[in-house]
Image (spheres, grey):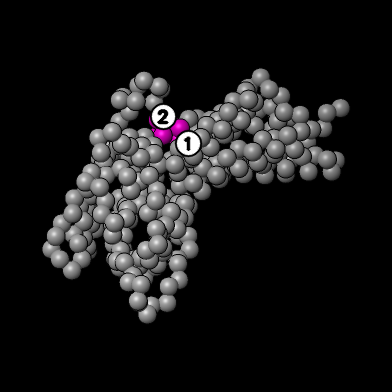
């Protein structure tokens, strides 16, 4: 005869697992929709959003960034030069746009999680709790990677930043003593502007090149084309991107659902196998 525990376990494998998988798919489809990747040839239909980056306590840097999905399609930056009242103005060249790799990677991980879930549709019969857990582990891995891409910006050395393609995007061209960087941190779009000065060959300063970092501080040094530079000023401004905030909430809910299903299948299977 089939015991109560065996019935409960079969119900879990047949009914609850698929109900949770459906819920997960619905949430992740919403997350994927937020990233809204256009179909080839339809890029112009993807919504353009303007974000004003500035600080109430600091007016040295102001930026207006245009985000279209994963691409910055325009950047308009005003920089008030330290020690003078001169204002420098830069914007992207018309033929250029900058892909935000973090958004692209996060979207790819969400889509991989969706593929894993759709490979086990309602007609699929799970045979063991271990099989459910294996699927949940794989989905959770993709979701954790997606979240980490948005919460952990890439670190760069100053010389990597100075030679990155981003420096060639602007008109008029960036002067040699200014560098910029864009990145995502949680739900924020961040712009950092570095002002530099050249260290004279006869300087008594102890030259020590800075390592890799998301944000470098004044005093950080680097070498490029036989010249040594020091960061004199750092300006960071940021702005919340509401749909990135939504996706982070979706990731949290999805990871909790995965963990819950994992715990349930583990609990019921352990309980059943004791009988």
- On whether residue 119 falls in the magenta region, the answer is no
> Is 205 situated above or below 22?
below
Along the horizontal axis of the image, is 7 left or right of 37? right
Residue found at x 76% / y 29% = 127
Q: Quadrant of residue 158?
A: bottom left
> Is 120 situated above or below 198?
above
Along the horizontal axis of the image, is 108 left or right of 34? right
Residue found at x 35% / y 46% = 166
Residue 207 visible here: yes
Give residue 226's position: percent from left, percent from top.
Answer: 40, 62
**Residue underneath mark 2:** 37
> Is 216 situated above or below 122?
below
Residue found at x 33% / y 48% = 167
Along the horizontal axis of the image, is 51 left or right of 124? left
Q: Quadrant of residue 195?
A: bottom left
**Magenta part of the chain:** 30-36
Give residue 197's position: percent from left, percent from top.
Answer: 29, 66
Magenta part, dominant SS: helix
> Is 111 situated above or below 243?
above
Viewer-proximal residue among 135 and 38: 38
Residue at the outermost left position? 85
Return the mark for residue 107: 1
Give residue 170's position: percent from left, percent from top.
Answer: 27, 44
Viewer-proximal residue among 74 and 206: 206
State the SS at label 1. Answer: helix
Return the mark for residue 170: none
Residue 56 visible here: no
Residue found at x 30% / y 43% = 169
State the SS at label 2. Answer: loop
The quadrant the C terminus occupies is top right
């Amino acid at each position: 005869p089939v015991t109560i525990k065996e019935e409960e376990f079969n119900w879990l494998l047949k009914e609850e697992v698929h109900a949770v998988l459906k819920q997960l798919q619905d949430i992740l489809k919403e997350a994927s929709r937020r990233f809204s990747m256009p179909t080839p040839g339809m890029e112009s239909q993807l919504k353009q959003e303007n974000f004003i980056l500035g600080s109430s306590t600091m007016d040295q840097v102001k930026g207006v960034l245009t985000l279209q999905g994963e691409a910055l399609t325009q950047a308009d930056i005003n920089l008030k030069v330290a020690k003078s009242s001169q204002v420098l103005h830069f914007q992207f060249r018309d033929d250029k746009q900058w892909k935000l790799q973090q958004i692209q990677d996060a979207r790819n991980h969400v889509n991989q999680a969706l593929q894993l879930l759709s490979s086990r549709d309602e007609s699929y019969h799970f045979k063991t709790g271990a099989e459910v857990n294996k699927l949940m582990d794989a989905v959770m891995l993709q979701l954790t990677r997606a979240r980490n891409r948005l919460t952990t910006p890439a670190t760069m050395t100053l010389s990597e930043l100075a030679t990155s393609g981003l420096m060639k995007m602007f008109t008029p061209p960036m002067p040699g003593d200014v560098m910029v960087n864009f990145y995502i941190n949680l739900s924020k779009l961040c712009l950092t502007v570095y002002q530099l000065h050249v260290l004279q060959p006869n300087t008594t300063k102890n030259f020590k090149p800075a390592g890799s970092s998301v944000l470098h501080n004044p005093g950080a040094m680097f070498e490029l084309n036989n010249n040594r530079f020091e960061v004199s000023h750092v300006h960071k401004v940021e702005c919340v991107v509401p749909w990135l905030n939504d996706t982070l909430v979706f990731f949290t809910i999805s990871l909790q659902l995965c963990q819950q299903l994992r715990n349930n299948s583990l609990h019921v299977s352990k309980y059943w196998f004791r009988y």
